Image (cartoon, coloured by chain):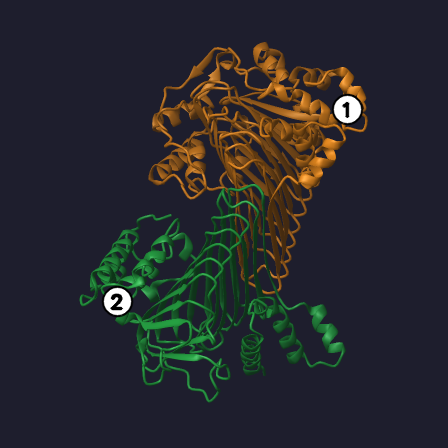
Amino acid sequence: MAEVHERDNPAEARLAAIRLPEEEAGWARAARAAALARLRRTGLPNQRDEYWRETDPSAFVAPEPVPAAPLVTDEPPVFDAIDRLKVVFVDGVFDPEASDPLALDHVEIERLADVLQADIHWARDLFGRLEETAHDPVPRPFAALNTAVAGDGIVIRVRGRAPKPISLIYLHRDDRSDAVLHHLVRIEPGAELTLLENGPAAARFNQLLEVEVAAGGSFHHVRAQGRDHERRAVTHLVGRVAEGGVLKSFTLTANGALSRNEYVVRLEGAEAVTHLAGAAVGDGAVHPFHHDDTIFVTHAAESCESRQVFKKVLRNGAVGVFQGKILVRSVAQKTDGYQLSQGLMLDGDSRFFAKPELEIYADDVKCSHGSTCGAIDEEQLFYLRARGVPRPEAENLLVLAFLAEALEEIEDPALADDIRARLEAWLRRRQG
Amino acid sequence: MMDGDDLRIREGVDRETVETVKSVGERYKYGFSTDIETEFAPKGLDEDIIRLISEKNEEPEWMLEWRLGAYRRWLRMEEPRWAMLDYPVIDYQDQYYYAKPKSMEKRPKSLDEVDPKLLETYEKLGIPLREQMILAGVEGAEQLPPAEGGRRVAVDAVFDSVSVGTTFQEELKKAGVIFCPISEAIREHPDLVRKYLGSVVPQGDNFFAALNSAVFSDGSFVYVPPGVRCPMELSTYFRINAEKTGQFERTLIIADKGSYVSYLEGCTAPMRDTTQLHAAVVEIVVLEDAEVKYSTVQNWYPGDEEGRGGIYNFVTKRADCREARAKISWTQVETGSAITWKYPSCILRGDESQGEFYSIAITNNRQQADTGTKMLHLGRNTRSRIVSKGISAGRSQNTYRGLVRIHPRATGSRNFTQCDSLLIGNECGAHTVPYIDVRNNSSRVEHEATTSKVDEDQLFYCRQRGMDEEEAVALVVNGFCREVLQALPMEFAMEAQQLVAISLEGSVG
C-alpha cells in the first residue's frame, strides 16, 4: 500500500517547512519527532494512493489553506440547550475567556499545550501512541502530521461517570486560518464520558482525537461539523477499546467544501463494542460538497461487536465517499460485525462511491455489509402525496426516514433531537 | 472409504454426494502428465521468440506487428501487486513461451491424423475427441437423440501452445458458425480477427494482457453470424503438459446481431513441484440482441498441501455488450490454481444490455484467489447481477474484488450484488473488496455481503442422518453454492458439484 510515488512539489515543500515545537518536555519532543519520521516515510498523499483516489487531498497538502469565509447566521448553534462544559477554540486556539472553567467531577481536563510542557504526565502513554498504531496497513499521513505539529487541544482523563458532557466548540473567524488540534481522552475502568464537538474551526482544519477506553469504560462522541460552505476538514478518531468497553461516535455533516473523516478503532478486549455512524447532507449547487468517511475497525479479541452506519444525501453535484473496512483477526471468534453505507441522490448530478471491505481470518463470525444507492422511491412519494402531503414535505419526510437509522446510534434522546432539528432546518433551507 | 453395502444402506442420501465423497481419496485427478516429445522454443522472452511464434503459426505481417507492439508496451509496464496475493517474484525469462508436441509438426488434417497419445490424454480427462469425431462422421448423427450423459458439445482441445483438434467443425459450418483455433482464424478469417482482436482487451490493457498479446500461441475463435442460434455448446479444453512452460491462450468470441452461443471452458495441468504460469485473455463481442453464455470450470493444478507447485493463473476476461439488448453471462467455478487473479468483466455499452456474473471460488491448503468482476454501466437501462460465493479452507486466502460503476449517461440502470463467504477452519481468510461508484440517481445499486462459517445446525442434521463429517460439509457447501451451480450448463454443474467436494478434501477435522 505504501507505494512511494514521485511526490509533487507542494508536498515536498510542505514537509520541508515543518518545524517541530522546541520548548516542550523530552517525551513530547520524542513523540513529535517519531510522528514526523512516520510522515516522511509515507509522504503526503495524492490521488494515486488507493485510499485517496476518490478524494483529492491536495487542499490538505498545500502549504497554505484555501481561504474560506465564516458563515454568518442568527441561528443558535447546535447543543445550545444542552447542559455541558464548554471548551472554546477560535481558529484552532484555546480561548479561556469564552470557555467554562476546566473543572468537572471525576474528570481531569487540561490544555494540551500545558501537558506537553510537563516532564511527568500520564499523557505520554497516549500522545501519538495510538496514532502510531493506526498506520498499518494504510498510512494516515495527516494524522502523523497532526501529532508532529498540533499546537493546541484538550487532554481529558475520566475516573467515574462525568456529570455532564464536555463540549468542544470550534469557532471560525479568520478567512485564512489553518487549525491543527489534537485531543487525548482516557476513560478509566468503568468510567463514562460524552464528548460533543461542533463548529467549523477554521478555513482548514486538521483534527486528531486519540481515545483509550479501559475495561468497562464508555465513550460517547457526538459531532456536528460546522456549516461553513468553504471549510475543509480532515479528522481522525483513533480509538482502542478494552474488555467490555464501549466507543460510540456519531457525526452530522451539513455543508463544507471538503470533509474527510477517518476512524481507526481496535477492539482489543473481549466483548468490546464500537458503533460508528454518520449522516451527511450535501448540496453542491452554490458551493462544492465533498464528504468522505474512511473507516477501519479491527476485531482483535473474542465476542466483540462493531457497527458502521453511514448515510449520505446528495444533490446538485455533491459527492459522497465511503471506504469502510472490518478486519477480523483469527483470535476474534464470535465476532459480530455489521456495516451499512447508503447514498440517496436527490438529482441526477451527484456521485456516490462506496468501498465496503471485509477482511476475515476467523471462522466463527457473523459479518455482513450492505451498500445501496438510488433516488427517492417514487412509490413512497406517491403514497404520501395521495394522502395530501405536498411534494417537498413528502421528500423531506422520506429523507429523514432514510437518515433515521444513523441517528438511532445517538443514545441520548436530547442530543438526537437536537441533531434531527438541524437536519430538518437544512432540508427547509434547501426547499423552493 | 465406504463399500457397496454402505451405499445401499444410506437411503435418501444423494447418490451424487456419496460418489463424490468416494472419489475424494483420489485427490487431484488430473495430475498425470503425458510423456510425449515436445518441441520448445528457447527459454526466455525477447522479440525473436515472438517472431518465432508468429512464424510457427504462419501469421501475416500485421499480426506480428501487433504482437511486437504489445511486447514493447509490456516491457514498460509493472506487474500489478494490488491484489491480496502473496507469491514470489516471477522470472519471466525462466519460462518457455512455446511448446508444441512434435507429432503436431505437420498440421493434421483431421482428428484421424492426430497422435493417439494426445487423444488418449483427452480421453483420460473425460473428453472423448475421437468418439465425437466418429459421431460427426456418421450420416444423420445430428438427428440422433442426445447421447446418454447429455447434449452434444463441440470441443477445441488446446495442448500446451497448440490446438490439437476441433470437433463438429463441419456441422457448425453448415449453420454458418466459425469455431476453430485462433491461429487458424488469423490465416482463414483475417478480416474478422483484425476487426475484433484487441477491441475489448487492448494490447496494453494490463501487464498480463500485454504479455498474452505478445506471446499467445493458440486459443479458440468463435463467430456466430446474425440470427443464428449455435446448434450445440462450444467448448475449449486447455491442458498444460510441458514443464516450465507458460500457457498463453487467447479466445475471441463474436456474437453477431440476434445470435446465441453457449461456451464452456475447462482446464487442467499435471502435478509438478515447480509453479507454472498461465496468462490468458478472453474477449467477447456481443452485438445487438445477441447473447453469450460463458462458463468456466477452472481446475488447474493447485499445488500440494504445503503450497509447492501449482499454476499461477492471471487471466483477463472481458465482454463488450456493444449494442442494444446484448447479453453476457459469466459463470465460473474456480477450484484450481495456486494463485488466481481473474476478473471477468462486462462493458454494458448498448442500451438495455445485461451482464451477469456467477462465481464459486474455492481455496484450500495454500491456495490464494483474488477474483471478482467489473460491471461498467454505460448505456441506458442496463442491468447487472453479481452472485459470488467464496469458500476458504485450510490455510488459503480468498478475496472477492469487484467494481460496479454507473456512468452519468447510464440512467435507469440496475445492479444487484451478493457476495457470500464461507470459512472452514481457523487458519484461512475470506475477504471482500467491492467498489461501488454511482453517478446518476435514476439507477439503483444494491450490494450485500455476508461471511459466516458452516452452520452447526445443518451439519448436526446431516450427521444425525448418518453422514460423516466430510460428506456433511460437502453437502452444506453445495447448498451454499446452489444459486451459482444452477447457472451452469447441466454437465458442467455436475462436474462442478463434485469438484466442490474434492477441493475441500482434508479441510475438516
Q: Chain B appears in which tint?
A: orange
Q: Nearer the viewer, residue B108 or B317?
A: B317
Quadrant position of the N terminus of chain B in the picture: top right
Image point (81%, 26%), residue name: B11
Residue B210, relative to residue B124: is it above or below? below
Residue B23, given in percent of the width and then of the height, sits at 66, 20
Image point (54%, 76%), residue name: A415
Q: Nearer the viewer, residue A53 or B410?
A: A53
Side of B383 where A108 appears, left or right: left
Q: Nearer the viewer, residue B132 or B309?
A: B309
Side of B10 where A60 appears, left or right: left
Residue A117, relative to residue A79: is it above or below? above
Residue B401, given in percent of the width and then of the height, sits at 52, 45
Q: Which mark is residue B328?
A: none
Mark 2 element type: loop
Mark 2 closeness class: few <14, some 14–19, many ≥20 residues within 10 Å: many
Q: Mark 1 falls within which chain?
A: B
Q: Separation of disc 1 and disc 2 at Cα?
A: 88 Å
Residue A388, relative to residue B438: is it above or below? below
Q: Say what amino acid the circle numbered 1 marks.
A: Glu
- Chain identifier matching the green colour in the rendered picture: A
Judged from this view, the residue extending furthest toward the bottom is A74
Q: Which mark is residue A116?
A: 2
Residue A69, given in percent of the width and then of the height, sits at 37, 81
Q: Are marks 1 and 2 on the same chain?
A: no
Q: Which residue is mark 1?
A: B142
Residue B213, given in percent of the width and then of the height, sits at 45, 34
Residue A22 visible in this rendered orientation of the protein:
yes
Mark 1 closeness class: few <14, some 14–19, many ≥20 residues within 10 Å: few
Q: Say what amino acid the circle numbered 2 marks.
A: Leu
